[in-house]
Image: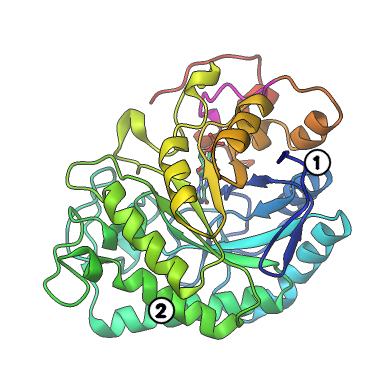
Amino acid sequence: MRTLFDATKINSMNLKNRLVRSATWENMADPTGRMTEPLFKVYEELARGGVGMIITGYAFPLAEEQPSPGMMGIYDDSFIEEYRPLTEMVHRHDSRIVLQIAYGGSQTGFQPEDRVIWGPSAVADLAFKVVPQEMSQENIQTLIKAFGDAAARAKAAGFDGVQFHGAHGYLLNQFLCPYYNRRTDQYGGPIENRARLILEVYEEVRSRVGNHYPVLIKLNAEDFIENGATFEDCRYVCHELAARGIDAIEISCGTFASGKRGPARNRIDTPEKEGYNAPHAAQLAAELDIPILLVGGLRSPEVMENLLETTEIEYFSLSRPLIAEPQLVQRWQGGDRSPARCTSCNGCFRPNPAGNLCVLTLEPQRDDASD
Ligand SMILES: Cc1cc2nc3c(=O)[nH]c(=O)nc-3n(C[C@H](O)[C@H](O)[C@H](O)COP(=O)(O)O)c2cc1C
């Protein structure tokens, strides 16, 4: 029988349990994307807290394209030495760390007027209204190379793997999405074309890190916007990536414009509301021979154990619960199996000069978030 605390392997990466910290932008790096003491501490607490794999907050691979403040950078070789203490620290605690690499695009409110922002087509972002510049073939080649360079740096810095961000309305997701992708060249139109950029990014990353290095992707099961990418689109991409050798796929959903069906849903207060991407993830896990990570609203060990019993999902990713309680996995392993304390209020998204912190730890418990 499979348990949450089975030791497993993703390609060359040994994992002590099936619990993953899903990528979480901490808003604590310095303005150039460099490590700071508070950010290092976040990772130290996570590594100490027992989680098997930590996926970093989204890191930007091109210096001029930072979609949010306080993000980690990976845009030049100086980051290799800079991240080594981080990866070594995580390994000392017998945890693993995977760098998430993301190009943001038009879904940004961070100084958009100061930057050239690329998109598949010049279509305004539904949430932020930013109109990107349609990418030329040359821009596409620059981006593909930037993902490859970033992955090679991550490997050299001691990260145990990389994940590229193909979900949540950021650029790679926008290429899949007919609403944003109005192109008439080989990157637009049928899903075979809309998926081309993601497949080319994967091939480039793989060619730079070799066959034994874990390469993961985060994808939306569905975008939940009008004319967004569908589950059929997601299935196509998953099958193509699996055939090319990707090591694992994390299944999420939604964008900033998806309302109540966004990636980080509110008020997950009953077991029935937990794991809202589980049906899609379970179907993919049954169809594919590679591990599927499920993310979104997971809060209690029983729900995850039930999914381990009834589906082929292999890993369970948590974001907000580990902001509130970085030691949650250790707590569960120690026998206190009460659900995560996180109330899914999304207070961790509220601007705070100290970073994206849990408001429950700052003020009395409340549940007042918007959707
Ligand atoms: C403050 C915050 C920052 C996030 N940053 C990222 C990110 O950098 N990359 C990413 O893929 N998802 C990011 N997410 C989404 C989470 O990884 C996750 O998909 C979502 O919160 C649902 O999981 P949860 O219910 O366990 O929080 C973020 C979520 C929160 C709350």
Image quarter where the C terminus lies is: top left
Q: Is residue 337 above or below residue 51?
A: above
Which residue is tagged 2? Answer: 144
Question: Is 18 drawn above or below residue 9 in the view shown?
Answer: above
Residue shown at the point (56%, 48%) measured from the top left: 293
Name the mark on residue 49.
1
Q: Position of residue 97 (x, y in %)?
A: 70, 59
Where residue 258 appears, as percent x and y from the top left, is 30, 37
Residue 320, given in percent of the width and then of the height, sits at: 59, 35
Specify whether 291 is left or right of 258.
right
| Magenta-colored span | 339-347
Q: Is residue 362 visible?
A: no
Residue nearest the viewer, comparing 169 with 222: 222
Q: Is residue 361 magenta?
A: no
| Crowd around label 1: few <14 · some 14–19 · many ≥20 (10 Å) | some
Mark 1 vs 2, N-terminal side: 1
Assign the magenta stretch its main secondary structure.
loop
Q: Position of residue 360 (x, y in %)?
A: 65, 22
Query: What is the three-letter code of the residue carrying label 2?
Result: Ile
Q: Which mark is residue 199?
A: none
- Residue farthest front in this picture: 1
- Tag 1 and tag 2, C-beta contact below 8 Å: no
Q: Could you tell me which residue is drawn at 67 percent across and 76 percent down? A: 155
Position of the N terminus, as image quadrant, is top right
